[in-house]
Amino acid sequence: MKKILITGTSGFVGGHFIHHILSGSGEFEIYGVSRSKPAWDFIPRVSDILCHHQFYEADLMDADSTKSLVKEIDPDYVLHLAAQSSVAASWSAPAASFTQNTKIFLNLMEAFRSTDTDAKILSVGSSEQYGNASQLDLPLSEDKPMCPSNPYAVARVAQEQLAMVYANGYGLDICCTRSFNHCGPGQTEQFVIGSIVRQFALIRHGKQEPVIHLRNGSVVRDFLDVRDVVNAYNILLMRGKRGGVYNVCSGKGRKIRDIVVMLSHMSGIIVDIKEELHQLRPMDNQCIIGSNTKIQSEFDWYPKISFEDTLRSMYDYRYKCLKHEIKTNER
Amino acid sequence: MKKILITGTSGFVGGHFIHHILSGSGEFEIYGVSRSKPAWDFIPRVSDILCHHQFYEADLMDADSTKSLVKEIDPDYVLHLAAQSSVAASWSAPAASFTQNTKIFLNLMEAFRSTDTDAKILSVGSSEQYGNASQLDLPLSEDKPMCPSNPYAVARVAQEQLAMVYANGYGLDICCTRSFNHCGPGQTEQFVIGSIVRQFALIRHGKQEPVIHLRNGSVVRDFLDVRDVVNAYNILLMRGKRGGVYNVCSGKGRKIRDIVVMLSHMSGIIVDIKEELHQLRPMDNQCIIGSNTKIQSEFDWYPKISFEDTLRSMYDYRYKCLKHEIKTNER
């Protein structure tokens, strides 16, 4: 049976990816590595999934552990999700953020190169790589220039360029994504839609005044449901070209403020919006929209879940979680 | 008196830069930091220069030492030369090369950011950043895409992109060069012209058969005399724009094999050429030529030393050094 290794397995995307793989027709042994154990309460049939997932608690910042792990598992496929992916954290600790993200990637690459282990590797990157894109270049296709504008984004560009060096210079079978914003049930309030959804659920439970707090409601982003994201990752992991780079995105731009309005209609809750402009980051792009023409034309991948369904499932999930939390606290 | 700090001061470029500064009309206190003491036997009036140069032996890989140094010196200008700049070494130890180059740069940036020290910083980058450039894009101007094709080059791209983040996001006064190949008296045989010149001098002294060993004689590179390079660095350090990026190059392409022919005529030594094709690197660009239009038009900088004079001074210097070496060995 073919083996898949997932780095950063315990996160939001890791859980959804494993659920996707186990729901599919292929048979795989699934290995995951992360610094903390997975919880994944947002995944259907989670106990079933946990028993199909061989979990290794390890830190990929350690080169020797990474090498031992790769030798022991000897995977056929690797989905590399592990990253410190907060832009805000990269502004407050730029050196640590940059070093951590590039080091874990290099440790992984060196583990494969030095042990001569053959595997198909998918390196997950970010739309942040495009950075201060010209609005004339929208929607952003993969040939557009990369002008990263925060420390996290520079690390992501370096990761992709290192991936190309390992693919073309050392012969590793690696391809890369530039993944735009994603969202879906289980996303935490660290991310913008996760935060808005949680606030609506708090308001519904009477735990927050009917005011939605935002950093900047006027920016436009390209959001894709995490279940469409992991479907794209599965396709690229199995069939993506060596040295290839693929946008993973919806191709549609949505203004944050409009998402608040959609959630207001959906939940029947009337809210005000308060923008915390003092929280603005040094450089925020006004509008980021990707083009998914390449992945569509090469692999016939396209988004299947409507944005309305995504918001609905996120709100339902968060509402239930909070209900449970509130009950537990009241006991 | 204004203070200049030079990182990686002990190298080939550091020595020539200090000589240039001390030969000019401005008055500066000069501080240098490096992991090893400078020798600079290739610089005229070296003892005079050494006594104008306050040298700190320190490793910029250490964040705390870097911070203490910046606080203690409190420089007005910083020329950041310190780097592990061998492409070959980056192929044999990619992770170490990448990590070292980005870490010393981040340590320096963080030292200025965290101590709120104001200084004008010139970050020296490389033509390797352009990498697998399209031949249609020659000569390469600063707006051309960067496609780095070795680990060293990826680190250089990251350094420039981080410099832009520190300039635009944190307000540091930093500008960047993309420096093409340079050469001049004192250059070691690690670099292609240094190696060819040394072989001619060895042949003249009867210490080598009349055969010049090359890795690849057919590639075309853009070579600039180190004395023109340091003049450009001085101008950019004093007047370069915050967040600006400038090519430092001759604007002319020269085939390595033609340089052998020039040296053959100059020295009167007839040689054969032997190409060590097994030494070829995974990915070598055939032709790299830069455009120096930007630095010429903004600062009226242009190369002053002819390539023939450069080769002559390199050959004369190396011939004398070898004479001295041979005498010492024969004693």
Image: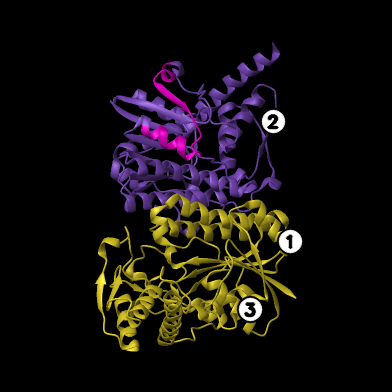
Chain colours: A purple, B yellow
> Where on the picture, by quarter, is residue B14?
bottom right
Residue type at mark 2 is Pro
Which span is picked out in magenta? A48-71
The lab-note entry on whether marks 2 and 3 share a chain reads: no
Marks 3 and 1 close (CB-CB < 8 Å): no
Residue type at mark 1 is Glu
> Given the image, what chain letter belongs to the residue carrying mark 3?
B
Residue drawn at x 68%, y 16% as measured from the top left: A329
- How far across and down, in percent of the image, does residue B16 sit? 55, 77
Give the structural element (helix, strand or loop) at label 3.
helix
Distance CA(mark 2)–CA(mark 1): 53 Å
Residue designated by label 1: B72
Nearer to me, A87 or A213? A87
Q: Is residue A52 magenta?
A: yes
Q: Residues within 10 Å of mark 2 (few under 14, many from 20)?
A: some
- How far across and down, in percent of the image, does residue B292 sit? 47, 77
- For the question of whether residue A143 can be seen, the reply is no
Residue designated by label 3: B49
Q: Eyeballing the image, is A221 above or below B294?
A: above
Distance CA(mark 2)–CA(mark 3): 71 Å
Residue drawn at x 46%, y 76% as measured from the top left: B328
Looking at the image, is mark 2 or mark 1 nearer the viewer? Answer: 1
Q: Residues within 10 Å of mark 1 (few under 14, many from 20)?
A: few
Residue designated by label 2: A210
Nearer to me, B144 or A257? B144
- For the question of whether residue A296 can be seen, the reply is yes
Give the structural element (helix, strand or loop) at label 1.
helix
Q: Is residue B47 magenta?
A: no
Q: Say whether residue B64 is left or right of residue A250.
A: right
